[in-house]
Image (cartoon, grey):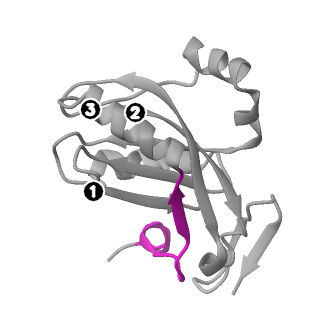
Amino acid sequence: SKSAIEQAKLKPLKGSPKLIISETVSKQITKLCQKYPNVEWSGVMYHTVTGNYTDPDNFIMTAEYILLMDVGSSAYTEYSFSDPSFAEALSEKPELMEMKMGHIHSHNTMGVFFSGTDSDELMDNAVNYNYYLSLIVNNFGKMVARIAIIATITGSESSVSFVDIEGNSIIQT
């Protein structure tokens, strides 16, 4: 039997938030998949938002730009925000600082799914954001995305508190 915290980690969001892939990001994905067809690549996916995830049906994220951070192996990729190219890119494109950050990586010729490593990355990084978006793509134009929101269960399993997109404390019972 799973603990309440383990159950909360797996609890799906009620509603249907949307992720729109801009033309710019669509072209970047195509170009990266063509340039690196046999290895995984990863980076920061900058996106804008409309609405709030407290109302998932009206929460819309638009992927605006990919900052490539790593070209890995056929089965693995990783990067660090301490990489000098991260700071350099922000100085060259200061408009990125106004956007939300998420993660994107390729599964090259594999299917798009959240492996154990991908799910761990999602949960590990979610603690650093009000919400965390991760997108996985492949060479065949397939995509899958997930959002992680860190919440605290207080008292009973029916009371959950978290921080919304604007930083407001929310308690749902």
Magenta residues span 3-22
Which residue is at the front of the view, 81 or 47?
47
Q: How far apart are labels 2 and 1 at the CA level? A: 15 Å
Q: Quadrant of the C terminus?
A: bottom right
Residue 28 figure quarter: top left
Which residue is at the front of the view, 22 or 94?
22
Q: Position of residue 126 (x, y in %)?
A: 56, 50
At label 2, counting other C-alpha atoms closer than 10 Å, the crowd grade (few under 14, some 14-19, many 20 or more) is: many
Q: Which residue matches tag 3?
A: 34
Residue 151 seen in render: no
Q: Which mark is residue 113?
A: 1
Residue at 66%, 70% (x, y): give it: 53
Q: How far apart are labels 3 and 2 at the CA level? A: 14 Å
Which residue is at the front of the view, 136 or 142?
142
Q: Amino acid at mark 2?
A: Ser
Q: Amino acid at mark 1?
A: Phe
Give the label, 3 or 1, closer to the camera.
Answer: 3
Q: Are marks 2 and 1 in contact (CB under 8 Å)?
A: no
Query: Helix, strand, or loop for circle 3?
Result: helix
